[in-house]
Image: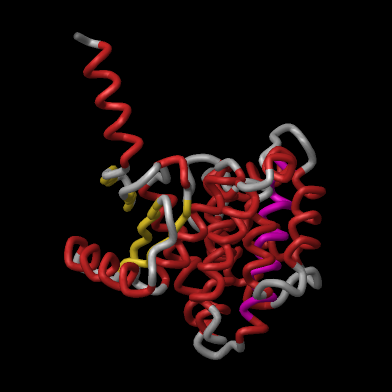
């Protein structure tokens, strides 16, 4: 859980990013997001540095000066200004500074997708890539592995998606291999899907059905969920014959399970209890 001071520090960095975004192209924002991800990886690899940059005993000007000296000529002005705003803030731990930098890297990439009109595609492609990985046991094992070099897994992801997805999708999916905010690969992808949806002012509904829904069925379900949550809901549909029939819907922590498989399980448990 991010501390109050950490959230305030992220807001300071976000203000710098959003001010720059208004006059930046999608390409410039993509570059900024990519550079912020690079800074994140650098901080992860340099524990002494991230402690120095988040040390409340050091003056903010000193922390910023150290940061700018390290980044000079390595990143663009926007990325440097965003991270400078972050290191001037207060953090409850060095890891919060890392998480804050990574969070704004993701936001910069999503701003780039919004700028060029590809945000909906990015959201859908991240979800579909997650389903593709889930459907391949060997690939899921490789990309979901812990204790192995995330750089190699990120490079594999980039090769798999190169030319098949939006540039922002490729960069975000590769970032998931490093674990966004300490999450697993699969949890990172889910976080990115939901963050992309939130950038479009939508919630995400994960829908599992035994057979594909037709266009009218999806539209009706989306309309019902929109009424329930009071905002547009993006459906992410997975076909799983194992549920036999019915439908399972999850939105955040809310789960509606009307699947036949659940009813059969309940019937078996009831009979076993007699």
Quadrant of residue 157 in the image? bottom right
Going 34% across and 72% down the picture, which residue do you hit? 201
Going 42% across and 45% down the picture, which residue do you hit? 2
Relative to 150, residue 82 above or below: below
Residue 202 % position (x, y):
34, 68
Magenta stretch contains residue 55: no
What is the span of residues highlighted in magenta in the rendered image?
A: 29-47
Residue 107 % position (x, y):
52, 67
Going 71% across and 72% down the picture, which residue do you hit? 164
Residue 210 % position (x, y):
42, 50
Quadrant of residue 263 in the image? top left
Q: Is residue 124 left or right of residue 41?
A: left
Whether residue 183 is visible here, answered yes or no, is yes
Whether residue 88 is visible here, answered yes or no, is no
Q: Is residue 115 left or right of residue 264?
A: right
Residue 70 % position (x, y):
77, 60
Check the image and tell me how it is coloured: secondary structure
């Amino acid at each position: 859980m991010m501390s109050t001071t950490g959230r305030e520090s992220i807001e300071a960095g976000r203000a710098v990013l959003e001010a720059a975004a208004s006059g930046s192209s999608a390409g410039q924002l993509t570059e900024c997001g990519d550079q912020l991800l690079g800074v994140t990886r650098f901080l992860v690899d340099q524990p002494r540095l991230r402690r120095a940059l988040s040390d409340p005993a050091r003056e903010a000007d000193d922390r910023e000066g150290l940061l700018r000296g390290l980044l000079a000529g390595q990143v663009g002005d926007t990325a440097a200004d965003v991270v400078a705003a972050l290191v001037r803030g207060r953090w409850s731990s060095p890891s919060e500074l890392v998480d804050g930098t990574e969070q704004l890297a993701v936001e910069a990439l999503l701003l780039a997708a919004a700028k060029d009109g590809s945000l909906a595609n990015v959201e859908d492609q991240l979800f579909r890539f997650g389903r593709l990985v889930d459907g391949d046991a060997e690939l899921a094992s490789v990309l979901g592995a812990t204790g192995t070099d995330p750089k190699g897994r990120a490079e594999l992801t980039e090769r798999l998606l190169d030319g098949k997805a939006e540039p922002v999708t490729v960069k975000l999916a590769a970032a998931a291999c490093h674990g966004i905010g300490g999450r697993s690969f699969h949890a990172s992808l889910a976080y990115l899907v939901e963050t992309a949806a939130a950038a479009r002012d939508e919630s995400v509904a994960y829908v599992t059905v035994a057979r594909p829904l037709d266009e009218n069925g999806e539209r009706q379900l989306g309309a019902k969920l929109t009424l329930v949550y009071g905002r547009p809901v993006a459906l992410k549909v997975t076909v799983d014959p194992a549920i036999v029939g019915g439908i399972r819907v999850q939105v955040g922590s809310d789960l509606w399970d009307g699947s036949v498989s659940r009813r059969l399980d309940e019937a078996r448990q009831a009979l076993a209890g007699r």
